[in-house]
Image (spheres, rainbow, N blue to C red):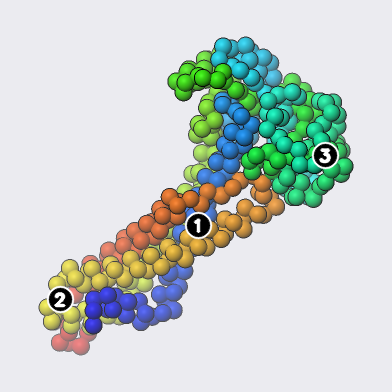
């Protein structure tokens, strides 16, 4: 009998217990894949939306929420006069319930601003002007709200008309309800208030020069903060909280998995006391006993990791299609995350097996003569 066959026999001896242990690890790893994948996907989706609009610098007041705090629209005029600024577009973004959708992106944009330019008409037309009581819907938003051109759309207490369906070039843009800034300001009672300024810098500026421009804006307007698109969400307390909650919940699930594997391996050691003592009596080294138990726990971790990655990926796909968040994120299930999850599951198995392995290797060979 080979060493590996001894390892697998130990796991197959109690198939139900082994299966339940693998399932416990799988749930923990699935939580890591799902929560972290959703968190990263949320950030990348919003960053892709900014890039689709042609934004180089984002000016906002990202506090503890998912949307920035409003500030006076006159800030845009002062920023627009700075050297190095090619164009600006004032925006008011809200995450709110609209008709049948519990959470929808409402994006109001300065009329004539460059953020309108990336929208491509799929059907219908653009609003005729900033005063027209009209909206355009991203393709995904139209599907979620089950709206077509000509349909009415209720926003707060106002009824507007869907005049166009657009392709925004990014998932977040396609999941948005888009309208002229003055219209939403009036609906929300926020005249003269915005919460984002999209900025395009002068072509040819280096990364260092863009960073200097951001710093100049920050010094000039202490109420807000200007950052490059790639750094936008690093400064958001709301997004940091989401990341922390994702990792915290994931680590709790992994800790539960560690306890489950440790319990299984301890029971295995107790049940196989006679076997271990006999192996020690015929000349096995204690280190080999430890290695056998650690291999078993590592295999449990690997099995749980494979199943967990599959469950997590499936769960994320299903969640991303839920009406509540559909169109707001594209899950990040890249190879680095899946590989990290697999490595973590194997590490969980090894860590869980350390004490049981040490316990099994400390048994006395003389117990083999005593029958246990």
Which disc, if any, is residue 284? 2
Within-10-Å neighbours for mark 3: few <14, some 14–19, many 20+ = some
Please name which of the two marks, 1 or 3, marks the residue nearer to the observer: 3
Q: Position of residue 280 (x, y in %)?
A: 15, 78
N-term-proximal mark, 1 vs 3: 1
Which residue is denoted by mark 3 in the rendering?
124
x 61%, y 23%: residue: 199
Q: How many callouts does the rendering have?
A: 3
Indicate the secondary structure of the residue bearing disc 1: helix
Which disc, if any, is residue 31? 1
Q: Position of residue 42 (x, y in %)?
A: 57, 44
**Quadrant (top left, top right, bottom left, bottom right) of the N terminus:** bottom left
N-term-proximal mark, 2 vs 3: 3
Q: Disc 2 vs disc 3: Cβ atoms closer than 8 Å?
A: no
x 21%, y 72%: residue: 289
Q: Disc 1 vs disc 3: Cβ atoms closer than 8 Å?
A: no
Q: Position of residue 83 (x, y in %)?
A: 56, 11
Q: CA gap, disc 1 to disc 3? A: 42 Å
Within-10-Å neighbours for mark 1: few <14, some 14–19, many 20+ = many
N-term-proximal mark, 1 vs 2: 1
Q: Is residue 230 above or below residue 329?
A: above
Q: Position of residue 213 (x, y in %)?
A: 52, 17
């Amino acid at each position: 009998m080979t060493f590996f066959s001894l390892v697998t026999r130990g796991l197959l001896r109690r198939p139900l217990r082994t299966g339940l242990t693998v399932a416990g690890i799988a749930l923990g790893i699935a939580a890591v894949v799902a929560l972290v994948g959703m968190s990263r996907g949320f950030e990348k989706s919003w960053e892709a939306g900014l890039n689709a609009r042609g934004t180089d610098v984002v000016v906002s007041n990202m506090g503890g929420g998912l949307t920035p705090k409003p500030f006076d629209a006159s800030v845009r005029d002062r920023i627009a006069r700075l050297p190095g600024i090619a164009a600006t577009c004032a925006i008011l973004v809200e995450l709110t319930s609209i008709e049948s959708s519990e959470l929808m992106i409402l994006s109001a944009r300065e009329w004539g601003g460059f953020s309108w330019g990336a929208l491509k008409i799929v059907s219908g037309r653009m609003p005729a002007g900033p005063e027209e009581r009209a909206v355009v819907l991203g393709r995904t938003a139209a599907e979620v709200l089950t709206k077509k051109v000509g349909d009415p759309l209720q926003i707060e207490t106002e009824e507007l008309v869907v005049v166009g369906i657009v392709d925004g070039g990014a998932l977040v843009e396609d999941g948005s309800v888009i309208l002229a800034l003055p219209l939403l300001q009036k609906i929300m009672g926020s005249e003269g208030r915005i919460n984002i300024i999209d900025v395009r810098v002068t072509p040819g500026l280096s990364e260092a020069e863009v960073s200097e421009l951001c710093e100049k804006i920050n010094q000039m307007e202490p109420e807000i903060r200007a950052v490059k698109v790639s750094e936008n969400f690093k400064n958001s307390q709301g997004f940091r909280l989401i990341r922390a909650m994702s990792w915290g919940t994931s680590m709790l699930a992994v800790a539960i998995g560690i306890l489950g594997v440790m319990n299984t391996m301890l029971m295995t050691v107790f049940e196989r006391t006679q076997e271990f003592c006999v192996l020690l009596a015929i000349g096995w080294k204690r280190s080999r006993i430890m290695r056998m138990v650690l291999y078993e726990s590592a295999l449990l971790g690997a099995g749980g990791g494979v199943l967990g990655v599959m469950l997590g990926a499936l769960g994320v796909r299903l969640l991303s299609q839920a009406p509540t968040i559909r169109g707001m994120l594209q899950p990040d299930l890249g190879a680095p995350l899946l590989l990290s999850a697999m490595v973590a599951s194997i590490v969980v198995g090894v860590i869980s097996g350390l004490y049981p392995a040490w316990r099994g290797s400390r048994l006395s060979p003389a117990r083999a003569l005593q029958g246990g």
